[in-house]
Image (cartoon, grey):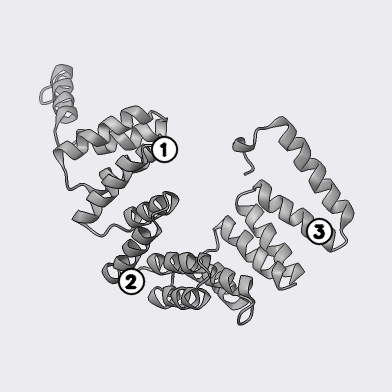
Amino acid sequence: MRGMPSATALLLTLSIIIASPALAETPFEAADRLIEAGHIPEARRALAAELRMHPEHVEARYNLAVLLQQIDKQQEAAELYRANLAIAWHLPSVINLVALLQKQGYTDQARQWLQKSTKQLRSEAAPWYLLAAMAEGEGRTGDARQHYRKAVTTDPLNGFAHLRLAAFQSRHKLADKGLKEANRAMQLLPDCAPCWRKSGDILLAADLHQQALKAYQSALAIKPDITTRQQLIHLLERLGEHQRATRMQQALDVWKKHYPPESGPH
């Protein structure tokens, strides 16, 4: 029929579209695909290629640093995080660099990075609650309390900040032992299974057994894991529900016998 393109013409047009630079996969995009497929060495090479073309690509450098940490190249990873922070104040790079420095024993350097971050990342709660955790670990409870409070006032919608403050209050039996802050955290983080478990721990410490039971059940409904199951079993024993606790323990023992821990429920 006149006016209809031939099959050859259609194939040629398609090949031109596929080869178009606008549609070509970048090394950064290829790295994401390779990571998802489990091809980590190839992903590292793709990210290195991306950085040769675009040295300012903060996310590519961050992803490469994470992959290097996985093969225990900690110093190289730290250098990449620092290179990122020379370009922009990238919160994930700050958090990973601080964790790495603390693990290596460079606590003062880690603290300095967090203190700088509170000034550069004025709307972020994380630098404050990480400073709080550091102060608490060093026995500076007063500083820790101030920093946890600063975290929730800096970003009132950060559920993790509220949960960390709640856990701090629970540990030190302050205020209402963290109940109000834990409740606020779970309003903000309703789909976070580890958060429900931590909320359950706070409720349990306050002797609110039934509320703790519901929190653990909420965690398991989102993502079953061994630790939460064991917490729930212990709570059921305390509540006198021995048969139910025994059934859960037997089911958990059978599962652990037939499946390795890493295959879930974690």
The residue furthest bottom is: 175
Which label sits on residue 141?
Answer: none
Which residue has dot 3 on it? 236
Q: Amino acid at mark 3?
A: Leu
Q: Amino acid at mark 2?
A: Ser
Which residue has dot 1 on it? 70
Residue 161 as seen in the image, left or right of residue 32:
right
Q: Amino acid at mark 1?
A: Gln
User: Considering only order in the chain, which callout, 3 or 1, is on the residue closer to the N terminus?
Assistant: 1
Which residue has dot 2 on it? 123
Q: Position of residue 6 (x, y in %)?
A: 14, 19
- Circle 2: element type: loop
Q: Quadrant of the N terminus?
A: top left
Front residue of this view, candidates 85 and 125 = 85
For the residues marked 2 and 1, what is the alpha-carbon distance in whole angstroms? 30 Å
User: Considering only order in the chain, which callout, 1 or 2, is on the residue closer to the N terminus?
Assistant: 1
